[in-house]
Every structure is written in C-alpha cells, then in structure tokens.
Image: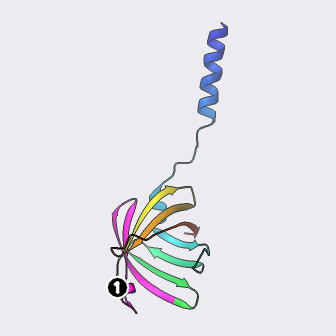
Amino acid sequence: MIQKLVIFCCFTLLFSCQNKQKLNVQNFKTGTFEIPEGKGFDKTTFIRKDSFQIETYGDRVDSLSIVWKDNFNYTLKMLNPKSGLDREPIRVKITGITSNSYDFEAIIGHSNYKQSGTVIKISN
C-alpha cells in the first residue's frame, strides 16, 4: 500500500509541475517587439509582419525583408542600405523561447562576429 502511495505522489508531483502553456515560435513572426539597450547599441523597437520588418533605434528607421529558413532561423536584409555593412544579410538563429520573448544569435554577412540578445514581444 505504501508503495502505491509513493508512486501516486511521484506521478502527481511530476504532472503538476508541467508547463500548461505551450510555447510557439510562430507567435514571433508578427507583432511589435523590443530589444533592450545593451553594450554598444541602443534600444531597438520593431514591427514585424512575417516577411517585413520596420525597425526604430536611436534616431534611425530601417525597413528590412525577412526570409524564414525554418521556425528558428531567418535572414534579415535592409531594403534601403546606406552603407556597405547595411548591404550584408543578417543571419539570425533563435536559441530559446519563452511565452513572450526569445533569445537569439545574429551574424552580419560572412563575419565571425556574433551578437546575442533577447527580443521581447510587447504587443500583437
């Protein structure tokens, strides 16, 4: 009888600790987002509609196209580049998600420099 009670308690504990909300990376393909200010860059706010993104940071506004390779990898490309660096594609890899944010690593062009950060969804 005690053995059955221990097994029942273990199952109850296991299932009561599960996350009831399913995480869905599709939630990050549209909406309004923010990347908090960090070392060497200003806070960035952007509006995304699946394959198009408008970013605002500092006193600058940019439009970018988005090509989704899969749910966790996409490429950004500036529509109106102002410099040679702006012409380079930005490859982004989503490395983790929560209900309202995701962590990412980004590489500009063919460099070895990786920028990491967190994108927070602030509205649909």
Q: Who's the residue at 60% across and 75% down the image?
A: 39
Q: What stretch is highlighted in magenta?
A: 61-87
Q: How many labels does the image show?
A: 1
Q: Who's the residue at 66% across and 14% down the image?
A: 5
Horizontal side of 121 relative to 106 (left or right) equals right
Circle 1 Cα neighbour tier, 10 Å, few/some/many (<14 / 14–19 / ≥20): some
In front of the other: 73 or 21 = 73
Name which quarter of the figure residue 111 lies in: bottom left
Whether 60 is drawn above or below 75: the answer is below
Question: What colour scheme does the image use?
Answer: rainbow
Give the residue number, with chain letter if any, for mark 1.
Answer: 87
Whether 26 is drawn above or below 1: the answer is below
The x and y percentages for residue 40 are 58, 79
The x and y percentages for residue 124 are 54, 69
The x and y percentages for residue 115 are 48, 70
Verify whether residue 4 appears in magenta. no
Name which quarter of the figure residue 37 lies in: bottom right
